[in-house]
Structures are given as structure tokens and as C-alpha cells.
Image (cartoon, rainbow, N blue to C red):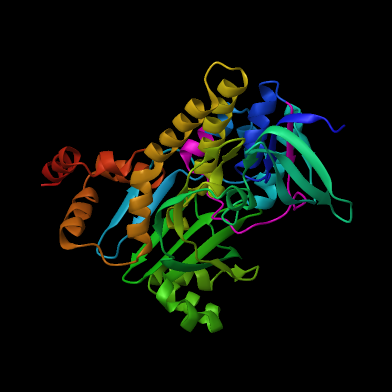
Amino acid sequence: MPKAYDAIVVGARCAGSPTAMLLARKGYRVLAVDRATFPSDTISTHLIHPPGIEALDRWGLLNRVVATNCPPIDTYVTDLGPFTITGEPGTAYAPRRTVLDKLLVDAASEAGAEIRESFTVESLVFEDGRVAGVRGHDKGGATVTERARVVVGADGRYSLVADAVGAEEYDQKPKLLAAYYTYWSGLPMDGRFETWVRPHRGMAAWPTNDELTLVIAGWPYREFEANRGDVERHFLETVELAPAFAERVREAKREERFVGAAVRGYFRRPYGAGWALVGDAGYNKDFITAQGIHDAFRDAELCAEALDEAFSESRPFDEAMAAYGSTRDGHVHAMYELTADFASLEPPPPDLQHFLAAVSRTPEAMDGFSRVLAGVTSPAEFFSEENAGRILAAAA
């Protein structure tokens, strides 16, 4: 008779491993499975904004990220053409996923979670109308069944768990942006996360491991098919829209191939009878604001806390998980909408241009805007009528 787990986590990257780690630290029996082996790469912005860094610090893992010689990012620079907004929202890091994901998997294992790499989940097990486990196989192995009180889907945008349980979607957004990135050597960033916004084009750059700099450039999704045949040309043409940066790029060396994606936005109901969703499996937005990793960390903490309440019977499962879902949505909804606006790459309307120009004239307002981009401050708070009035008055 196979042993039963308290939780089986499907997917062991930025949402799955922290969820497994946090539950294991609370003393629960946890199995985390992933098709991949670690270290391995995946498409990602890499950027961990200050809220995610604070989570790593709470978990005792920040020193491990720092030890990988990933440089800190202290300054956010947003070049809007007529003016530039430069602020200091706190410290960020942008480790490569080959580094970060392995670090998180190891932390989950050290906490007591069982980790199975190269394990493919074929289907969920349903008993009496609820999820009761998973069926799957190791590479080249026979199919096995593992049971748990809850199966947590941390398996990304194309989540098998979400599909199997028919997780309801709401507030969907279409694909808005097509973007590609690669890595350059000889392109120092001096602790800066730099973004350039131009009509129907955008680009950004920030430092990562191995003295490399990630550079990303994009255009509206409606141009995806027309541009995909010559990504390099369109990428470099976009970079040329920021001449000073383009000169820096010409003096650098591209080290790897271009990697690209276009993603749609959605919320999924994040729980049901015997199941839960975390990370991109439960909620996704365009990557232009690079919020995904710290969103995944926050989901892991919220979900692990809710499951602890349910497992310990201090709160009914549905009540605890409903609170997890509503808290998640409350945290991210304003940024979800702002991200869609940014991803359209449409020039801001005149009143917003006027406001952002005012922001660029006061250091305090620039720090405030940078905290929005960093996920520290809600856009609803920063763009509120009261706060906007203060900024406009100070600039005048």
C-alpha cells in the first residue's frame, strides 16, 4: 500500500518548490514532482523584485542567491523618450533560472520534502468527487499512483492540474506583446534595471549571473508573424531607438540565442475539492512588468498558510482556501491591469504623459513610481487622485 502524503506538488520551480518547502517546514509529508531535472533553464524574466527578495530573506535563502555572484539591482530607470524616471525602490536580483530553481529545489529537499525529478504526471486520481492523488511515471519507468490529501498544481500556464479539474478562468487578457531576450557580455549595468519605452516598441536590460546582461526587446503581438522570420534584425532595430544604449550594445558581445514568448493573461479559481493552484497555474499576466517570480513566492506563502489551517483543522478547507484566493486577487489586480496597459505599447494619453513628466521632476515621486514597477506599492495607491494631486503640486 503506497504511503499517503499530505500534499503532492506538481511542478518544482518558483511556485512549487517554495510551497513544498514551506509545508515541509511545518511538518507535513510532501512530495514534489517535476518533468525536468535541476539545474535546467526555462523562459523567464529572471527578475526578482524587492518583495520577492524579502521572501527569500524570510526563508533564509537570500544569502544563497547572493553567493552565486548575481549582482544586486538598486536603481530602476524608465526612459520614456522626452523624460526619464530614475528611482530606488529597494534591492532586486535577477538570477538565471538554472541557478534559482536548483536553489529552491534543494531548499525544499532540505526541509524534508521528497523530490522526484524526471517525473511526468499522466493524470489526477479522483475519489468520491475530489482529487486524491496523481498517476505518473519516472523516465522510462512504469506508471505509479501516489495519494495525498491535496494536490497542488504549480505546473505553469499549461497546467495539467488546472485542466484536469476544470479550473474556472476569469478576467482574461489576450496576447498583447511579443518579446525576445538574449544575453550579452561586456555590457555592464552598474546595478541598474533600465527600461526604454517608445511608441509600439519597448526594451529593457538588467544584470544576471556570470557577468552577463539580459536584454529584452518587444513589439505588439499583431506583428508577431511578420517579425518572427528575422528576430535578430527587428530586435536590433528596436535597440537602435535608444541610441546611447545601442552604442553600448554594439561594444558588447551576444553570447546566446534569442528566446521569445507571448503570453495571455488570466485568473483561475485557485482551489477546489482536494486541489489548489499556485504561480502561473493559477494566475498569469504579461511579463513586461516582470512580476511573475515574486507573485509565485507570495502565492506559495499564502497557499501554504491556508493549507496549514485546513490540515490542522483550525479552519475549514473551503474557508481557508477562499481567503487565499481573495487575498491573491486583491494583491495583484491593480498591477494586472497596469501590466496590460504597458504591454499594449500604446503611447500614454496626454493626461498620463503630463503626470509622468511631473513624476520625473521630483526624487520622491520617482522613487514612488519605481516602487510601483517593483511591486512594492500598488498602482491603485500611487495613481490615486490624492497622491497624483500631491505629485503635480510638488512638480509645479
- The image shows residue 324 at horizontal and vertical percentages of 48, 32
- The image shows residue 80 at horizontal and vertical percentages of 30, 61
Frontmost residue, 101 versus 155 = 155
Q: Does residue 79 show up magenta in the picture?
A: no
Which quadrant would residue 242 be assigned to in this image? bottom left
Identified at 41% across, 35% down, the residue is: 326
Q: Is residue 242 above or below residue 32?
A: below
In the image, taking residue 37 as reference, residue 358 lies left or right, namely left
Identified at 38% across, 50% down, the residue is: 336
Report the span colored magenta: 29-54
Q: Does residue 30 show up magenta in the picture?
A: yes
In the image, taking residue 32 as reference, residue 84 lies left or right, namely left
- The image shows residue 51 at horizontal and vertical percentages of 47, 36
Identified at 59% across, 47% down, the residue is: 165
Q: Is residue 84 above or below residue 199?
A: above
Identified at 51% across, 81% down, the residue is: 233
Residue 137 visible somewhere in the drawing = yes
**Residue that lies at the very extreme toward the front in this rendered image:** 128
Q: Is residue 47 above or below residue 67?
A: below
Image quadrant containing the N terminus: top right
Residue 93 visible somewhere in the drawing = no
